[in-house]
Image (cartoon, helix red, strand yellow):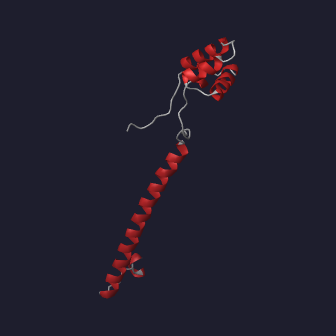
């Protein structure tokens, strides 16, 4: 079975139907128009309000769902700085680990780091 899709009307179709509905003068003509086009009276009410407000672009089908937000340049910079911070934190942890190992090796070998003698400096 094919998947059912929502009917959409172009702005030209909506204006055509509204003009035909405005031309209906006899009782029952409007109902016949609605049945022929497969519409509800609420469609006409909504489209007439949009036409009266001068929103011809609003008569075109609108995309459904939340509107996309433009990307914020500060968010991109914040992400970049967070990544850099995480990278530097990892390098610091590695350097501290290396220093700790060097200290332990020096203690095991009982070697002390050379210190300058005071008499050699003079």
Question: Toward the viewer: 77 or 19?
Answer: 19
Residue 72 shows up from this direction: yes
In the image, what residue occupies the spot 47% across and 58% down? 85
Residue 56 shows up from this direction: no
Q: Quadrant of residue 121?
A: bottom left
Determine the residue located farthest toward the front in the rendered image: 28
In the image, what residue occupies the spot 44% across and 64% down? 89
Question: Toward the viewer: 56 or 107?
Answer: 56
Q: Position of residue 32 (x, y in %)?
A: 60, 19
| Quarter placement of the C terminus | bottom left
Q: Quadrant of residue 36?
A: top right
Q: Is residue 28 above or below residue 8?
A: above
Judge from the rendering whether residue 13 lies leftward or rightward of residue 50; answer left or right: left
Question: Toward the viewer: 99 or 29?
Answer: 29
Q: Position of residue 43 (x, y in %)?
A: 62, 27
In the image, what residue occupies the spot 64% across and 24% down? 44
Question: Toward the viewer: 106 or 51?
Answer: 51
| Quarter placement of the N terminus | top left
Tag count: 0
In the image, what residue occupies the spot 54% across and 36% down? 64
Q: Position of residue 59 (x, y in %)?
A: 59, 23
């Amino acid at each position: 079975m094919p998947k059912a899709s929502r009917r959409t009307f172009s702005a030209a179709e909506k204006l055509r139907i509204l003009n035909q509905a405005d031309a209906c003068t006899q009782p029952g003509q409007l109902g016949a128009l609605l049945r022929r086009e497969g519409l509800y009276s609420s469609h006409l009410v909504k489209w007439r309000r949009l036409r009266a407000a001068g929103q011809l672009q609003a008569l075109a089908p609108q995309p459904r769902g939340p509107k996309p937000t433009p990307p914020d340049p500060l968010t991109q910079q914040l992400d970049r700085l967070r990544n850099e911070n995480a990278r530097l934190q990892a390098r610091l942890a590695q350097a501290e680990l290396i220093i700790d190992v060097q200290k332990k090796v020096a203690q095991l070998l009982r070697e002390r780091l050379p210190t300058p003698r005071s008499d050699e400096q003079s």
